[in-house]
Image (tube, rainbow, N blue to C red):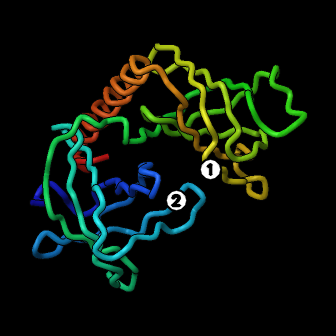
Amino acid sequence: MISNLNISDTVEICITDKELQKHYYKTKIQDIGLNNTFFTMIPSSETGRPVIFFKDQTYELYAKGKEGIILWIIHYLGIEKMDNLSACKFQAISGPEVTQRREFFRQSVSVNLNFYIMASEANTDTSIERSGRIVDLSGGGCAFMCNDQMILHSELLIRFSFRGTDFEFNSEILDRIDFTKTRADWNYKYRVKWIEANGKTVDNLIKLVFAQQREILINDASRGGDRFV
């Protein structure tokens, strides 16, 4: 059932919250066990906090392969020590299944963006065009770096060009990481989701993101790299 998985593969685990919103967390396969069990590194949220799983609860596991995006339904079994490191133990209960939900995968990129703050705290100038750099991108949103301090749930108008195509999305800030006390090139990292995005525009973005993923997979395979990126 899990023969498609290999140690060190990058995967994403999906958690569905009480409001039926889906959240995706990237991690790596740490070991493969018996009876369709496997271990992953403990994933972290965008704010750096460890992700909490609940025993015997069902989750979704996604992995990228040349066939497309592969899905398993998994149960969380608990935390165990692997080489003195804590690891999450899961068991696959169904799958693998090839799925077309490519937008759930964030692709690492380096893309310039411009944005306007449309709705935020009082006294924010919404006419100023601000700039930053997208560091990962998906059909559902992006993460970007910039030097502007903004509060959570601010609404932004984001514009960028990806693989020769111009995009514009209304978005909402979900997370913020403060780098002002580090030597990072940018002061803040934000994760945003698209708001009421046009379906055709999202489909076009997903196709371009998937095209870039495929190029990376092919290049890695030619260099003898990991199967999944």
Q: CA distance from mark 2 to mark 1?
A: 9 Å
Residue that badge 2 annotates: 45
Q: Is residue 117 left or right of residue 176?
A: right
Residue 32's image quarter? bottom left
What's the amino acid at mark 2?
Answer: Ser
What's the amino acid at mark 1?
Answer: Asp
- For mark 1, give the secondary structure: strand
Badge number at residue 42: none
- The relative height of residue 117 versus residue 199 in the rendered view (above or below) is below
Residue at 35% in and 57% down: 13
Residue that badge 1 annotates: 175
Residue 205 % position (x, y): 41, 23
Residue 190 % position (x, y): 63, 44
- The relative height of residue 208 versus residue 33 in the rendered view (above or below) is above
User: Which sits in the foreground, 209 or 174?
Assistant: 174
Classify mark 2: residues with Cα within 10 Å, few (<14), some (14-19) or many (20+): some
Q: Is residue 58 left or right of residue 127?
A: left
Residue 78's image quarter? bottom left
User: Which sits in the foreground, 206 or 147?
Assistant: 206
Q: Quadrant of the N terminus?
A: bottom left
- The relative height of residue 13 versus residue 121 in the rendered view (above or below) is below
Q: Is residue 148 left or right of residue 46?
A: right
Determine whether label 2 and label 1 are within 8 Å by CB: yes
Residue 138's image quarter? top left
